[in-house]
Amino acid sequence: MPYANNNGVKLHYEVFGEGPPLFLHVGLGGEWDLWKLAGFLDRLEEFQLIINDPRGFGSSDRPKTLAAYRMKNFVQDVVTILDDLQISKCFFWGHSDGAKVGNAFADAYPSRLRALIAAGGAMGPTDGKERRDFAKFVRENGMGFLSEVFEKSYGKKLPLWYTRGRPLRDPAIVGLQLLAWIPWANEAWEMYPRIKVPTLLITGDKEDPTGLNKKIARAMPDARCVVLKELRPESSDVMLDHVDELMRSDITVPRAKRFLRKHMR
């Protein structure tokens, strides 16, 4: 089980396949093997996939301070893993909060990126209220809802290899990350015009009724937006629509591959 070390925080990651390196970063509360569960290992066979357990989750270390979960540390975690593998430049695909890490990574280290896919991670002008409210909800209700929505999106019982090895998702750590990112979130809108790497934004239509992703794509020098309308047309469940972006790799990967292949030349 490979690990990298960022200033004393041990970071677990996995590597699969050969080809152009593609870093996959899951969202808040997730672990690396969500990408496996969703079928990405089979559908992205032409790439070398680097998949991490974000700090605080899975087999990575779980610091207990707010400062440990600032955005700059998540970005440095990506850099640390790439350095550990001696990879100078990669593609990056992030989902949800993983997409936000991708944006911050592209802003801070553009020379390390060939192209960026940001799925379900749109961040508009905010005072942090949404993240504060969600942190309060998680503290009061725990993280049980997350497994339920993954299973609903998967469309059947989650396999034993996934459920049996599921580490405890600590609501306190989820709350720390939610609150620690607020200063960065307040400035995110000003970041988009600085991101010059080619970018594909992916969103479900239910989660983005105001067209925020398209506005962000227009603000970025080299970006386009794909709105997935076929994820779950019979449902108005915004959370499920958002999770389906990850779990429905049969829909998202073909669009992403066209974008990635264009920038492999």
Image: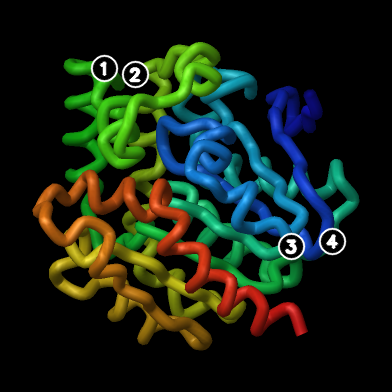
First along the sequence among labels 1 and 4:
4
Three-letter amino acid code of the residue under disc 3 = Glu
Three-letter amino acid code of the residue under disc 2 = Pro
- Name the mark nearer the viewer: 1 or 3: 3
Residue 46's tag is 3
Q: Residue at x 84, y 61 (%)?
A: 88
* Residue matched to label 1: 142
First along the sequence among labels 2 and 4:
4
Three-letter amino acid code of the residue under disc 4 = Ser
* Residue matched to label 4: 88
- In the depicted structure, whether residue 2 falls above or below residue 15: above
First along the sequence among labels 3 and 4:
3
Q: Secondary structure at mark 4?
A: loop
First along the sequence among labels 1 and 3:
3
- Residue closest to the eye, 239 or 106: 239
Outermost residue on the front side: it is 156
First along the sequence among labels 2 and 3:
3
Q: Is residue 184 visible?
A: no
- In the depicted structure, whether residue 205 falls above or below residue 45: below
* Residue matched to label 2: 171
* Quadrant (top left, top right, bottom left, bottom right) of the N terminus: top right
Q: Secondary structure at mark 2?
A: helix
Image coordinates for residue 261, horizontal then vertical, percent: 67, 78
Q: Residue at x 36, y 86 (%)?
A: 218
Q: CA distance from mark 1 to mark 4?
A: 39 Å
